[in-house]
Amino acid sequence: MKKLLLSTLMAGALAVGANAQDDFNKWSIDVNGGFNKAMTPMTPGFYSPIVNLGHGDVGVRYMFNEKFGAKLDYGFGRFAEASQDNNPEFETNYYRLNLQGVVNLGRMMNWETFSRRFNLLGHAGAGIGRITPQQNLHADFQDNVYNLMAGITGQIRLSDRIALNGDITAIANGRQDVAFDGASAITPEHFSYYGPKATWWTGTLGLSFYLGGNSTHADWYVAEDKYATKEELATQIGEIRDMLKDSDGDGIPDYLDKEPNTPAGARVDAFGRTLDSDGDGIPDHLDECPFVPGPASNQGCPVEDDEDRETDFFKQAINDGYVNVYFAFDSAKPLGYSSSAANYVANFMKRNPGVNVELKGYADELGPENYNQRLSERRAKAVYDLLVASGVDSSRLTYKGYGEDTSVDKRSADARQLARRVSFEVQ
């Protein structure tokens, strides 16, 4: 039993965490605003500022795992002239819609080894857009374009639900027909009509709002966190070993033993308590007739030689639930502390050759019902084999599996232990 408990508890210590697929949130909403810079083409004499306040974007992002994802985002804003004297005025509105792939560079580069607050994302993709000058020669011309883009996003984790983002993105427009200032057209002889003909960039600050029922988003999830370190495992295993000490050697670990000082060789129940099956005040391990009351002067056996009376007491002991062989979870091997019950039954049957016994196997309610039915039959067969091996004629024995014992509270580990048994019925 101690080996079974140690194995079970150690397995639990090793499996810290659940399925990785369900350990983190995958969805986020990203909202950003900041600057833009129109680079080229610009009509000679027109200039854009180094940074122009006038860009915003909002996106929905989904991470397939902690390293890779995708996002759909919508960006919009305006370009305007630099503020220097004699610089011609212009104003151009734009919008774009892009589908991008996302790479969690922080996880790829193992940033978690030195920081759990800072992170880095990379993104790149393509989309469509429109450039609409508001002034000059091509005012109100709706210039439909496609675009290619790539950028880097630095992150600061503010909480489990929010991160602060700083992003720089470079964008190249294809099939653009007019300059960013709207004062001139892009001549075909200088550019391929279908290739990228305009470049600009954005720099933004914003927030990511994480959605989902888990505590951590994929941006910050570290798979190794669900596993215990060597030091943690060593501590946990040490605690388990201490907990499973069996001070009195009765097969019941101290943390379950309600009588941790039983004498050597004592027959105990599932809680480590010394058994006195016939209630005559003599413990079973000292009682030569443990199921029939008798005085201590006769080693616990009745003075009169009355087979019928002994049989009646044996039946009563069974009906009162004193004689059972118990099993560990999902096992058909009798627990050491309870297998002596089979020896008592064998001795009784040898002294009473006219008695037949049925062996009744049971299982707890954990697991599929059909599996538990087969398990209860295997348990009954195991005890049957013990009795036959001890010299009881097989013709005097029958065995049957009765499946799950629903009479106990399946929420209680102690009750489930009592359900995992083979009982005896004298016929």
Image (cartoon, rainbow, N blue to C red):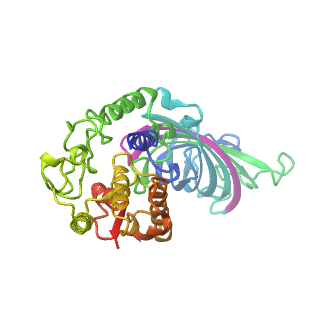
| Residue 397 visible in the picture | no
Residue 221: x %, y % from top left? 48, 42
Seen in the image, is 33 located left or right of residue 365?
right
Q: Quadrant of the N terminus?
A: top left
Residue at 33%, 54% in the rendered image: 344
Residue 172 in percent (x, y) is at: 70, 46
Q: Residue at coordinates 35% horizontally, 35% vertically from top-left?
A: 240
User: Is 367 in front, or is 153?
Assistant: 367
Q: In the displayed image of the protein, which residue is found farthest to the bottom? A: 427
Picture quarter with the C terminus: bottom left
Find residue 108 and report its image quarter: top right
Q: How many marks?
A: 0
Q: 269 left or right of 64?
A: left
- The answer to if 159 sits in the magenta stretch is yes
Closest to the observer: 71 or 336? 336
Of residues 259 and 229, the one nearer the viewer is: 259
Left or right: 19 as drawn, with respect to 294? right
Indicate whether 235 appears above or below 10.
above
Range of residues picked out in magenta: 143-165
- Taking the spot 26% from the left edge, 32% from the top edge, the residue there is 247
